[in-house]
Image (cartoon, helix red, strand yellow):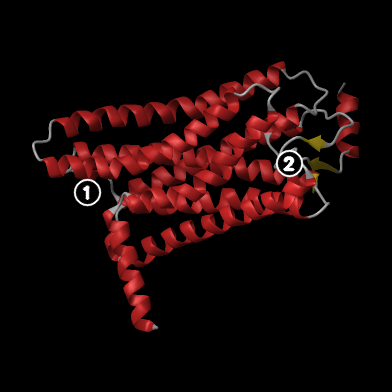
Amino acid sequence: MGDRGTSNHSEMTGFILVGFRVGSELHLLLFLLFVLIYALILMGNVGMMTLIGTDPRLNTPMYFFLGNLSFIDLFYSTVIAPKAMTTFWSAGKSISFAGCVAQLFLFTLFIVTEGFLLAAMAYDRFLAICNPLLYSMQMTARLCAHLVAGSYICGCVSSVLQTTMTFTLSFCASRAIDHFYCDTRPLQRLSCSDLFIHKVVSFSLSGLIILPTVFVIVVSYLYIVSAVVRMRSAEGRKKAFSTCSSHLGVVGVLYGAVFFMYLTPDRYPELSKVASLCYSLVTPMLNPVIYSLRNKDVKEALRKLWEKKKMIL
């Protein structure tokens, strides 16, 4: 078995990305859809980072985390979208072995980092609402940097482990990945190896990522709800729920799509692709919109930037 795996990797030069199993007449429509979504991702997230970087009023921990969230959304969608668009536009659906490894590694790195970053943002909201007088002393620039760095470290460790486990498998003759990017589950379907231990380790790793982040988010919001209910000011309650609803919306979209994808049985690969599309491209597109619509500071910064541009023109 060891010799077989060795020869398998030496002969494996690349894979074929099958994409969505639709008629050729719909490929142009899918290409245009991906172009539109990716353009909105670029505009929304680059715009959000620009606003946060140029407006002094947005120089707070919450917007520091939001800027990093936009950076992550921009880059993990960039790992997926351009290659997916080329598979729809041209006949060349191949991806090199090294390219597939890089795509899985980078996507896993950014998506896991986002999960931990969302937990850090929930903790930030907990401190801001439950301990407002001590917030500036507790949520220091150093702590913010440590939380973001810790998120990236967790994402990197998880990505190294997941990518290493996936590409030490022995692959069969078929090189056709039934997906629009290199992901763990479609690659497992190509494997000749015994997947039991691999799936147990992969499931345990997912649990170590999801359970702590979900626990921090849920506990933070239990304390937040308790604090908001005790507020005497209706305006204070409205402001607290306004700042939290954006974050909850982002968490709901991301984790909803992830759970849907991983709970979908392998016999329904097209459903899995739709769920992957939601959290790999739709979520990064919606995040800036969610934060812009529900946030007065962001809307005010946008208004001032627009007025400044009109004066220059």
- Other residues around mark 1 within 10 Å, as few (<14) / some (14–19) / many (≥20): some
> Mark 2 sits on what residue?
19
> Mark 1 sits on what residue?
136
Residue 165 visible in the displayed image: no
Residue type, mark 1 in image: Ser
Secondary structure of the residue carrying numbered label 2 = loop
Residue, x 40% and y 43% (percent of image)? 147
From mark 2 to mark 1, how far is it between C-alphas? 48 Å
In this rendering, would 65 be left or right of 199?
left
Residue 173 visible in the displayed image: yes
Q: Where's residue 264, x and y in %?
A: 61, 24
Q: Quadrant of the C terminus?
A: bottom left
Residue type, mark 2 in image: Gly
Name which quarter of the figure residue 272 lies in. Answer: top right
Front residue of 58/267: it is 267
Residue 83's label in the rendered image is none
Above or below residue 276? Residue 46 is: below
Q: Where's residue 266, x and y in %?
A: 69, 23
- Other residues around mark 2 within 10 Å, as few (<14) / some (14–19) / many (≥20): many
Q: Quadrant of the N terminus?
A: top right
Q: Where's residue 40, x and y in %?
A: 52, 57
Front residue of 298/106: it is 298
Q: Where's residue 5, x and y in %?
A: 86, 28
Name which quarter of the figure residue 213 lies in. Answer: top left
Residue, x 91% and y 32% (percent of image)? 7
